[in-house]
Image (cartoon, rainbow, N blue to C red):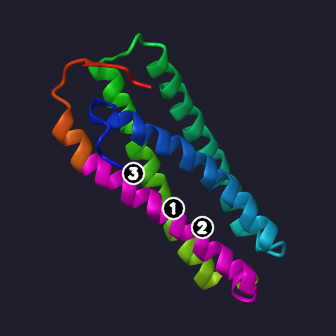
Amino acid sequence: MKFFYGDKNILRALEEAEFWKHQESEHTDVIMEVAPDLENEYVEKLEQYKQIFDSTHDRAVQYSQAAINCSNIISGEMYENIVNIVDLSIRQSKVFVEFLGMLLRESEAVKENPAAVTVVNHIRRESEYFIGVVTAFLNEGCSNHYDGGPIYGNIM
């Protein structure tokens, strides 16, 4: 993600969160497809993650729509709400990455399936990418660009 969007950086981060929560939701299905004999405890956990990711994705979509409908003005409150959903998305992905590592270490269904190992590792790297990119944005972009007042400009 590039940081030259100026006052629209926060909306770029929101777009990333929206996209990656959808991806991670789909990834839960992919894992269950590639490892059809996955242990029930992991299937249940993946189903829980799917619900969580879908819920967060829906909230990100709502904030995106609100930003589009706010006459190109983002209030301080909306800005904070967007930062919070992006931060929540990162924290969810960190927990998911830890879960994927545990799945690789502890699930016999995954360990005994080379394709599943490859897929889970790929999914883990994608979630790590999201974490890295958006964390960098929050550390650099938000703290340097927001002064607490409304943000004006063409937001989309």
Rendered view: 102 above or below 5? below
Identify the mark nearer the N-term, 3 or 1: 3
Relative height, residue 52 to residue 131 (above, below): above
Residue matched to label 3: 1
- 135 displayed left or right of 95: left
Q: Earlier in the sequence, mark 3 or mark 2?
A: 3
Q: Which residues are magenta?
A: 110-139
Q: Which residue is mark 2?
A: 123
From the top left corner, tell me how far across and down residue 16 is, in percent.
Answer: 48, 45
* Three-letter code, disc 3: Met
Amino acid type shown at disc 1: Ser
Label 2 residue SS: helix
Regarding residue 94, the answer to whether it shows in the image is no
Q: Position of residue 33 (x, y in %)?
A: 81, 66
> Does dot 1 land on a helix, a strand or a loop?
helix
In the image, residue 106 lies in the stretch drawn in magenta: no
Q: Where is residue 129, by image quadrant?
A: bottom left
Amino acid tagged 2: Ile
Whether pointer 1 and pointer 2 mark residues with C-beta atoms closer than 8 Å, the reply is: yes
Magenta stretch, main secondary structure, is: helix
Disc sitting over residue 127 in the figure: 1
Q: Residue at x 76, y 74 (%)?
A: 39
Q: Report how far apart the C-alphas of labels 1 and 2 lie in the structure.
A: 6 Å
